[in-house]
Amino acid sequence: MMENLREVTSVLPILVFVVPVGAALLIFALGRMHRIFREALALLGLAVTFAISLVISGRVLSGELLTAWNGNLYVDGLSALMEVLGSALGIVIVLYATKYLPNHQIGLPLSPWRHTYFYGLLVLFMGTLNWTCATNSLIWMWVSLEATTLTSAFLVTFYWQRESMEAGYKYLLLISVGVTLALLGCVLIYAAAIPLLPGENLLHLTEIGNVARLMPESVVLVACAMFVAGFGTKAGLIPFHAWLPDAHAEAPVPVSALLSGIVIKIGAYALARTVTIFAPYYEAVVIFVAILASVSMVIGIVMALVQDDLKRLLAYSSVSQIAYVIEGLGLGTYLGIYGGLFHLVNHTIVKALLFLCAGALMYAAGSRKISELGTVAKKMPVTTFCFFVGALAIGGLPPFNCFMSKLTLFFALADREILWAAIIGIVTGMVTVACFVWAAFRIFWRKPAPTPNPQIAAKSVPFLMQVSMLVLALACILLGVFPQVLYPMLNAATDSILRILGAG
Amino acid sequence: MAEVIAGGNLIITLYLIHFGFSLLAAELRNLRWSVLAITLQSLFLASILATFANIAANPSLYLWSLTALITKVMLIPYLLWLYIRQLPTAETRPWLGTIPSVAVMLLLVVFIYSFLHTNVEFIAPSLEAAVEPARSNLALSLTVCSLGLWVLLVRRDAAKAVIGLVLLENGVHLSLVTLAPTLPETTLIGIVTNVIITVWLLLYLAGRIFRTLGTTDTALLSELKR
Amino acid sequence: MGPIVLLFIGFLLLVTGAMVAIATHRWRLVCSWLSFVFVLLAGGCFLYLAILVFTSGPIAMAGPLLILPGIGASLTIAIDPLSALLLLIVSIISSCTTLFSVRYTLRYQGESLVRYYPFLLFLFATIVGVVSTRDMLFFIAFWEMMTLASYALVVFERGNAVSLRAGFIYFLVTHVATACLVMAAIVLYVKTPAPHSFSFDSLSASLGAIVAANSALVHLILALFFIGFVTKAGVLPFGFWLPNAYPAAPSGATAVFAGALEKAGIYGVVRIFCELLPISHYSYVWGQVIAIFGAISIFVGTMSALTQDDSKRLMSFHAIGQIGYMLLGIGLGVFLLPINPPLATIALVAGLFHMINHSWFKPCLFLNAGSILYKTGTRDLNKVGGLLRIMPFTGATAIIASLSIAGIPPLNGFSSKLLIFESSIMSGVGSPLFIILGLVAIFISAVTLASFLKFLNSAFLGKLYAEGGIDTQKDVPLSMKIPQGVLAFLCILFGVVPLLPMRMIHSAISSILPANYSPAAGFLFGTSLPGFSLNLGQGVIGAWNPLWALLAMAILFALGFFISKAGMARTREAETWYGGREHVVEHVRYAPHSFYNPFKQIFAFTIKGIKFEGMYPRAISLPRVTMPGRLKAAFDIDHWLYYPFARGFMRLSRWFSRVHVGIPQVYILWIILGVIACIIVLFLLPAG
Amino acid sequence: MSFVIGIGILNLFIALGLAPLFEGVARKLKALVHSRIGPPLIQPYYDLLKLLGKEDIQPQGMYFARVVPWICFATVATAALFVPMGTDRAPLGAAGDAILFIYIVTLVAVCLIMTAAASENPFAFIGASREMMLQLTVEPVLVIALITAALNARSFGIGDMANWYYFKGPSISMLLATIFLFLALQAQVGKLPFDMAEAESEIVGGLFIEQSGPKYALLRWTLMAKQIIFASLFVQVFIPWPRIEILVLDILIHLAKVLGLVLLIGLIDVVNPRLRIDQAVKYYLVLVFFSLGAVAFAVIGA
């Protein structure tokens, strides 16, 4: 626990979400003139945001808590982590998208406006993400969370085909309904907490911890149920995950990498801010989250096993992997949260890598169906290597990053005497390995499919896309071999959550 | 004391009218009429806010009713009206006819009121929420929310789904009044802008779907199986 | 830092070697020779380190290299004599096999070397990692990486489906084994004292605590560890994958598997059952379990080897058999720990001595099989014959290695088998179980001899014959002869001077067992360097003096030579006599598969139609054999266990994914029902 | 040290020197049974001397084939050094030399098989495979008998076994072991019912078809010596009784017992037809199974 924490008011938390919004507006304005404008502006916006978030995390690591607007914006370890992760992923995705969007098969020739609003919405989405991480009030967090959904809705329906519109419609409708339920939960918690906090009219997330135990128990349980349901829809836990496979399958690959990488993580972040606070005081919440997570883990990966469409397979595996993160966060102990956050970071990297590989495959082979992708290994060595690194990493094999995070999670579960969850986790790990290795085997090494797809590797994968894939693959291996690189950042994030719990 | 009681039964009547219009908005098959019903319902929501302002002597509630008036009574109906013109007026046949859905709704109202009147502390977090006008307001908001969900569940038409979503948001807006009166206005404006943008995006999407699919029947939107 | 730096230099060399191999894999010879140079240097470092440890006691790192604070795991490096043994083996085996594969991989023109040398070097690095870490988490991490590297080597020949399938089975089985290790580690980790940590000492403390509480949990932990290690070592019934997986890999890699990879399993068993497990009645029970599994593998492995005609498969079955001998020795040692310290030490020394000897003759045999494959292009013994005429050096090393694995006196196999037999029979006085196991061991050593004589007679002796034709009359290139020569020389050296390695192993054993538990080496094995005597405290029970025997044999050889020359008989060269008729080699050859026909008929009992030749069901899918459908189905595990399970699983997952009907309203229904379910479950769960 | 050399020379003299004599006696007995006079007792010496002078035919290029017969002779002679003939300790034997003896004898068999295999002649291969199968099934009987004795005497030394048996007197396990070992002796020395390895009539000299001249002489000599070694082991361990502490007399008694045993073997050899190899293997496997009974009794301590 870092004791010497100084509340420092600084302009950074505001900048971190104003800059992307500004950049987005600029893109909307100038984007149509020329390709360079929109891509350069997007990259510039995200680079500046990334720099700001690095400065913020540097200051947070040195023991400062940045606040702005007298406490309404509040950046601690966890939000710094999410901002850094988000903007980093954003940069990689934009790099990938510059090459991917202009010249791939699906969809009619894209008008310049279509490109501009893609980059614009992407950067705007980053802005809303940073705003979610920065706000300190429960209700404002809900508002910004809803804003992220809105900005990413039209990214999903980018192709405006029949399927992508359907996916977009479901994405928007289901998440709005789900997140409205979470609003009910927020209102309940707000109403229960306000009388206990005199002179406080905007319920700060940091203060909830002090009164967590004093609130009436039935209200807290109902609110937790609402939170889990609402933010669970956003994160994609089983009964509420319906939008996830369709949105991932139909959205363009950079967007699905974004969805899988950051969007569901915002759901997990929201749960970390709300449900984890009640974990130490209400054993039922911990057990409930563990049950729900185990169910989503198993059913998610079981459904992934049989998918023929590569992106739907990756979507279902996201359902199963995010369950690990939420199970960790739900435990409420240092090790649990540390493991959950560690897996959150690892999964973002691995899943983004796998989606980019899927994109490269679609780019070269023009098809998403595993049955139609026969032996492409020889023609696409980099993609094969990256996909295998991703497959082995997500399975949780030692030299890669998910091994350490899953192991930390299992120890946390074992420590909290919930051994059955650990065993389910290990079994799911094995099924994940089997599912991915089998899929990789079918795609890369199997003899060509009975109906040989003519344009297999008609085009070679452009260099920029390969670079972004290699960067992510390298991150997987590096984090696997030197897990303690992330230790200071994760420790700060976990301490920030525990400080909120501890205060209570 | 008198106006309190007078105010009291004024509130009850407003509640009933509000509930009536939301039921109408849900059931009317002609989209234009249901848009009209939803605007009236929002109007009464604003009036409820106003009456609550003078009952609980909380001036900020007047501001709340003003914002509700601007957004919910003017902006959303304008958007709805703008897009409904492109869509067919008649709504596609819902799964359940009017009689069974009305019956279910009444059953739901009875259940929620009886449940809240017996053990209100189960859901009401603080003491003043458990007092008479707030309690029935809470009950009303829960019913309107469940009505909204019911519309989303049963109705097949895309526009009708938007109306269901608006009903749901109004219900939540109502609960805000009783549970979170001290909420600053900016947050409220934030929530309401969110609702507006959602409605606008959904309607634009419904329009595009209608142009490609030819119908606004969301049940047909089920290509992505398995 | 001191000498431990050598370990990092070695490790670094291997990793850079792998990188260099990746970089230069286009130019095959350059890549091979560079890898060999790197491996030789690394091997030199490890060898020097091992010798240093034997002479001046264990070396440990000052602080932990890498700390995982959250979990309490830290990569602490410590080389004690036991790991020094493994280092010794790895250093020599790695250099020999890499040198051998320099020319051997020229055979695989189709396959790119980028999937051979990097993984080979990575395999050596991970084995060194496994033996040098004192922390269970990193032990498992290295263990899993070792499996990955070996899997990559097994599926080296991408073309043929058999090796891919064998590789896949190998991958799954070893993965399940590692899962057992992980679970055992977790159960132990949770029970460690307050600041949970993974180091072996804290784990052994927690195991001690559980043993003190004498709960059945100890059996669970030990069973999980045992299955984890034994599957890797290839002990039947867990090692069923071995006869398919080893021949699939190229001979250089198979030699490493048999030489060093299996020994990691044995190292694990010794580490857990002698060091972590405190000496208690558990070691009494588990000693017998280990010994019985050893005996099973000896019997089934070697009996089925008798009937094999494929040279590499023959060697793999014998690998299983020989591992059985080691486990018999170690199991006996663990069994005797609570009762009789001197005999326990001798038994453990016997087991480990056989491990080292096995690391010399088995890779040598695999390299011989590789040379035959290199020269004649076939592994089937029926298609080759009389190669001694054109491959004298390989033939000589094959004869030495075969005789030493069969346990013929002057060679190293004999001294370790002698130790195993004497300790098992002598300990049998207390319990009859070990007499039976001893008898099985002796009888099976005769069967090993028979099987290797068949290998020698069919491959090297007899008429020169190779179905695929032989390109050049010369022996295999020099770079393939040297490793076989080195290994054969080591077999002779360890056979003639057994006391030197036994003192090393004794120091390793006494370093693991509690202090001054096992009597001094001098007391147990005598001091005279040439021979050793087994002293059990109550008098010497066995002694073997190889030098004297060799001296006598040399004198008598000279006597025989002079007698035969005394007659001054003229010598004449002549064609072999085939009853005087014209002959073609094929008609006249006595093919190996008919070598033990009578014996096979006796041991080829059939259970209702399924032909069993020497305990291991011959390839069941014999088309010709008409057998009752029911029984064939009963034996074909794939059909009644694996495929239905897989199909059921797929149907379940297809049913789950069909739940997505696509209609938005249904999904909204899910959300509503989900919320209601959440509320109900939350209220039902036991509150706070 | 001097004791070892002295006894060593004595053993060699008995095993190599007297072996042809005992063979001559056996031939004489065969002749008497066939009711003919038969060759003089020292006929085997003449055969060996004649063969030493005969022309030595060698296969081209196989140096190994030339060296192997000498190795055979050397191993048999070394085996002789491990068997106590009359004395209580074998010249080279130390404590626990029973297992050494088993393996040295196996080495002898290996050398014989190597000679056959090196000669590339299919008949020799058939002989080698038969010899190996015989060795495979007969050796366990020898091993089990020795282990029975070892378990009783609590030590692996052949001398200790003999002493223990001498002082303790007959016991059930030892009697059983004696019977089974005697039944196995026939095959170990390669006498008639089980001499299919070098069956002259079937596979034309079997193992030694390609050997000629001095090589053949050495190999015949090896067979004769092997017979004496096995006989003396049998006699030393399993019939130790008439023992007088004087060395010379003990040796003479030992020779007498060995002679009696050789005669008995010769008698069985004469009257029995040659068995097929699978019959022999089946017979000996049954014998091995029953000899386990002897070990069981030894364990119980009977």
Image (cartoon, rainbow, N blue to C red):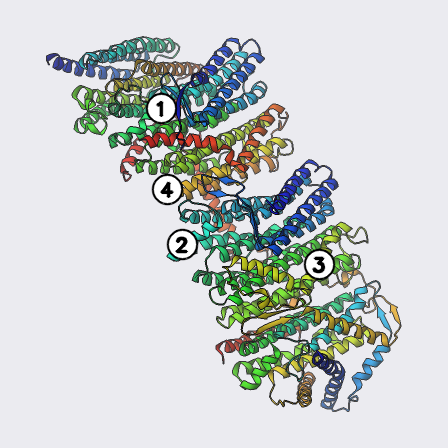
Whether residue C398 is situated above or below residue A297 in the rendered picture = below
Q: Using the image, name the chain to which the residue with label 4 belongs.
A: A
Quadrant housing residue A322:
top left
- The amino acid type of the residue labelled 2 equals Ala
User: Disc 3 to disc 2, how far (Cα)?
Assistant: 47 Å
User: Disc 4 to disc 3, how far (Cα)?
Assistant: 56 Å
Work out whether disc 3 and disc 1 sit on a shared chain: no
Q: Which mark is residue A416?
A: 4
Residue that carries the numbered disc 1 in the rendered image: A179
Work out whether disc 4 and disc 1 sit on a shared chain: yes
Q: Using the image, name the chain to which the residue with label 2 belongs.
A: C
Work out whether disc 4 and disc 3 sit on a shared chain: no
SS state under label 4: loop
Q: Identify the image quadrant of the C terminus of chain C.
A: top left
Q: Residue at x 45, y 58 (%)?
A: C278
Q: Using the image, name the chain to which the residue with label 1 belongs.
A: A
Q: Residue at x 61, y 86 (%)?
A: D240
Q: Which mark is residue C209?
A: 2
- The amino acid type of the residue labelled 1 equals Val
Nearer the observer, disc 1 or disc 2? Answer: 2
The image position of residue A228, as x and y in percent, is 35, 30
User: Disc 1 to disc 2, how far (Cα)?
Assistant: 51 Å
The image position of residue C566, as x and y in percent, is 86, 76
Nearer the observer, disc 2 or disc 4? Answer: 2
User: Disc 4 to disc 1, how far (Cα)?
Assistant: 30 Å
Residue that carries the numbered disc 3 in the rendered image: C488
Quadrant housing residue C54:
bottom right
User: Disc 2 to disc 4, how far (Cα)?
Assistant: 21 Å
Nearer the observer, disc 4 or disc 1? Answer: 4
SS state under label 2: helix
